[in-house]
Image (cartoon, rainbow, N blue to C red):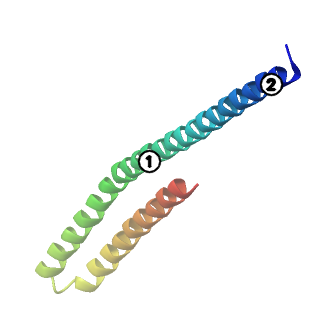
Amino acid sequence: MTTEERIAKLEAKIDALQAKQAALHQQLNDAQIEQWQARIDDLEVQVHLAAMDARDRLSPMLDRLRGTWLEARTQLEGRTETAATVADSLRIGLESAYRDLRTAVIEARNKVSS
């Protein structure tokens, strides 16, 4: 084998290796893109589950708050002589229910943020 033939053979091998290296880089890029897609999909699922959990926890609290408000409105509409006493009791109940709901919303938001 002549020197020129050996050089040509080595150049062909170099070209083949460069092509293989380019293909491997492309495969690595594709794998990284797929990995990030999977991470994003997982995060979407977690956000959805957190939203469902928050809705499940907050809906009953919101229903209780509405119920307390309706009860307060009914009692205040029917009684003028004890309205101040009833109003104070109901205000305390509404404030407590509102605080509980607000705390739950903040906790749910923090859970999603972390």
Residue 71 sits in quarter: bottom left
Q: Position of residue 67 (x, y in %)?
A: 23, 63
Q: Are marks 1 and 2 in contact (CB under 8 Å)?
A: no
In the rendered image, the quadrant that contains the N terminus is top right
Residue drawn where x is 44% and y is 47% of the image? 44
Residue drawn where x is 60% and y is 38% of the image? 26
Mark 2 is surrounded, within 10 Å at the Cα level, by few (under 14), some (14 to 19) or many (20 or more) other residues, namely few
Mark 1 is surrounded, within 10 Å at the Cα level, by few (under 14), some (14 to 19) or many (20 or more) other residues, namely few
Q: Position of residue 45 (x, y in %)?
A: 43, 43
Residue 17 sits in quarter: top right
Spatial CA span between label 1 and label 2 = 51 Å
Q: Nearer the viewer, residue 84 or 41?
A: 41
Q: Secondary structure at mark 1?
A: helix
Judged from this view, the residue extending furthest toward the left is 78
Residue drawn where x is 71% and y is 33% of the image? 18
Q: Amino acid at mark 1?
A: Glu
Residue 10: assigned label = 2
Judged by depth in the image, the label closer to the viewer, 1 or 2, is 2
Q: Nearer the viewer, residue 49 or 16?
A: 16
Judged from this view, the residue extending furthest toward the top is 1
Disc 1 designates what residue? 44
Q: Is residue 50 left or right of residue 33?
A: left
Q: Is residue 91 left or right of residue 75?
A: right
Residue 23 sits in quarter: top right
Question: Compared with residue 43, is residue 76 higher up or lower down, i.e. above or below?
Answer: below
Going from N to C along the chain, the mark reached first, 1 or 2, is 2
Q: Nearer the viewer, residue 111 or 66?
A: 111
Q: Is residue 70 left or right of residue 41?
A: left
In the rendered image, the quadrant that contains the C terminus is bottom right
User: What number of labels is visible?
Assistant: 2
Q: Secondary structure at mark 2?
A: helix
